[in-house]
Amino acid sequence: MKAGLYYLCLILLLVNISGGLYAAEPLSKQEEKKIRSLISKMSLEEKVSLLHGNSKFYVEAIPRLGIPELALSDGPHGVRAEINRDNWNYAGWTNDSSTYFPTGTALAASWNPELARLRGEVLGEEARYRGKDILLGPGVNIIRSPLCGRNFEYMSEDPYLVAQMTTAYIQGLQSRDVAACVKHYIANNQETDRATVDVNMSDRALHEIYLPAFKAAVQEAGTYSIMTAYNKFRGFWCAENPYLLDSLMRRELGFEGIFVSDWNGTHSTLSSAKAGLDLEMGTDKPYNEYYFAQPLIDAVRNGELPGSLIDQKVAGVLRLMMKLKIFDPTKRFVGSMNTPEHQQATYRSAAESIVLLKNENNILPLDPAHVKSLAVIGDNATRKQSFGGQSSEIKALYEVTPLEGLKNRAEAQFEIRFAQGYQKSRQASNKPDWELINEAAALAAQCDVAVVMAGLNHDYDTESRDKPDLVLPYGQLELIRAVSKANPKTIVVIIAGSAVDMAGFNYRVPGLLWAWYNGMEGGNALADVLLGKVNPSGKMPFSLPVCLDQSNAHALGEFPGRDQQVDYFDDIFVGYRWFDTYDIAPLYPFGHGLSYTRFEYSELSVDKEEWNMDEKLRLSMVLSNTGRCDGAEVVQLYVSDPESELPRPQKELKAFQKVFLKAGERRELVFELALSDLAYYNDSKKEWLLEPGAIKCLLGSSSRDIRQEITIKVN
Ligand code: BGC
């Protein structure tokens, strides 16, 4: 225990409440007056019509009061194609193909919040063009288990990284007069039993790990809405959870927007209404029979609910409309669709997300002086991934596959030949197809270099289902082994949104890249990385375990629980917090990603050695690109507090900067962080605390590649 037992604990709770910057501007007095006036003119039926869907993605208009219908749409990485009003089939429009961005984990792998903001802006522009008011995203649940089917839609195992991306994304989106609906609040960290499971976790895990992205969405980005999760949290459905909705989000964190249920995720009228749910969505026909329709009217008429509660919820919906300038359409953002700028934004995001995991003997980038022929192998070389994964699927205007990307960029330089290698089967299968494998190995033997486009697809990375295990399906392990035996110059490109088992082939191949479901320009971006036109700068946003049993939810916690209950015994030790604290070596650590150039870290310094709690810590260092090509490095700042009263993870990410440097260039980087951001949540005291004593600041190129270290003293 630090500094003897004398506690000079700083109670940071207040700082946390008041310190946040409320990006959501309050409405003017006139606007509030208009809202009151509209409500005063509404019948109870009209009011309640604003609190539930009247079709899959719309809320009814009240034309006599000039209130248009409210249009909602999925999803996090593109505006979803139009769905029929009364069923889940697509409407078959011919003008709803849209821009398709890299999915959530890919965005996080760029470690570039500027790209998150740009994505928000583009999605906002496309949503506006399509007449949408609320976009159902971003998805910000924490990657707790590598098996969660929706990991590809979410972002990271690290709450700080998710919070940074979330904030920028929402700010971008809402700047285009489209509301974000940050989801799924909270703990939808698995798809198995997602609609029934009861999640239990400590207050500390909630505050330190699972809540920060939602908190940032509210306090830093001013999100206009939040989607409640399907699951229960500590015995209560999230959509009717008084602690989550009222105490924590509204009172403690100051959320002023609306709570929207996940689709068909409402379970009651009275409890949901009292807890704070505002809008019930996702029901079926007849819409007026669901919880927030006729039963809500009846509850007011019977005196079970006060009319003022309904007015409060209606005011919330109208405020959201007001913020989107729905009542002042001439001032509202008009929007655009499928512009070259939008496509360029997806390219940038894709190019910056690709992670170079391994590059022995500088096998990459491919050197046309020595490489004349290329064997491109694997189903993922030709598979389009946009239209998959369920609610986040996108009807992309186009999608460049990896093989097309290589042909676009390099057909003149190399002979490019393709072999199928493995086949996506109808059912989940691990059976190798030896005929395809032998054909691929024979092709690999005839070419200078083989590139296996391996990984998963949206049969695995998908909503509604978790992955059965980490195994690369369809016999891909056998394929990679055979190809690398036939040609030792084999590069494996993993196309997947969440971890897969790579221990069985990692040591056999000199080159390994992670290329995600990388949006409509993904194939071009991948080709540019393989050819060295783009220097890879992505970093893994989650740890890659050697095997499943290594990772926290499986080794320490529970996944997916038993008897419809899951206890997060892994607590705050999620991802690298678990691997590092318990000294377990993953295959590739959180934050890892190589470059074609070299970066040196030097001259780490702080202005002074002793710091007071109310101060901002200022660290500076010099980053130099000492290699031969331009490139970007993500400098990661972790802190370590080895002597706190409660055990803390060995290190926690507290800041990062993505820095582009020309070859030979050096730059001084300054990191400023409030001491209060170094606190931990002490759940017995229900306070954010930082005790006096030593804190280590670690600057690294990954969570396990720390280049500079300095110890400061906190008074
Ligand atoms: C998903 C949400 C999605 C909604 C509407 C639900 O099944 O959990 O993320 O936004 O459907 O499609």
Image (cartoon, rainbow, N blue to C red):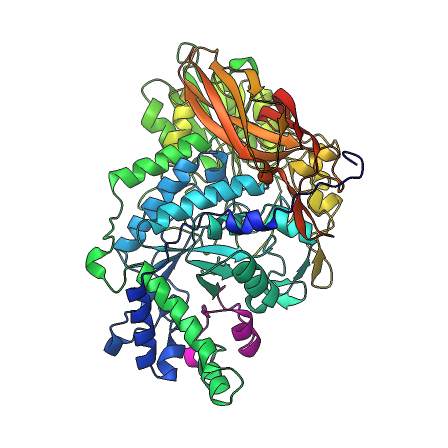
Q: Say which residue appears at 48% left-offset and 34% top-offset.
A: 111
Residue 301 image position (x, y, % from top left): 47, 89
Frontmost residue, 510 versus 334:
334
Q: Is residue 259 visible?
A: yes
Quadrant of residue 384 within the rendered picture: top left
Left or right: 228 in relation to 704: left
Q: Is residue 385 visible?
A: no
Look at the image and say whether residue 265 sits in the magenta stretch: yes
Q: Is residue 90 above or below residue 583?
A: below
Residue 39 image position (x, y, % from top left): 34, 77
Which is the main secondary structure of the residues drawn in magenta?
loop
Q: How many marks?
A: 0
Frontmost residue, 11 versus 524:
11
Q: Is residue 82 above or below residue 271?
A: above
Q: Quadrant of the N terminus?
A: top right
Spot the residue most to the left.
Answer: 330
Q: Say which residue appears at 66% left-offset and 50% top-offset.
A: 687
Q: Say which residue appears at 73% left-offset and 63% top-offset.
A: 563
Please state the extent of the stretch shown in magenta in the rendering: 261-289
Q: Quadrant of the C terminus?
A: top right
Frontmost residue, 55 versus 573:
573
Q: Is residue 688 above or below residue 464?
A: above
Left or right: 372 in relation to 251: left
Residue 681 image position (x, y, % from top left): 67, 47
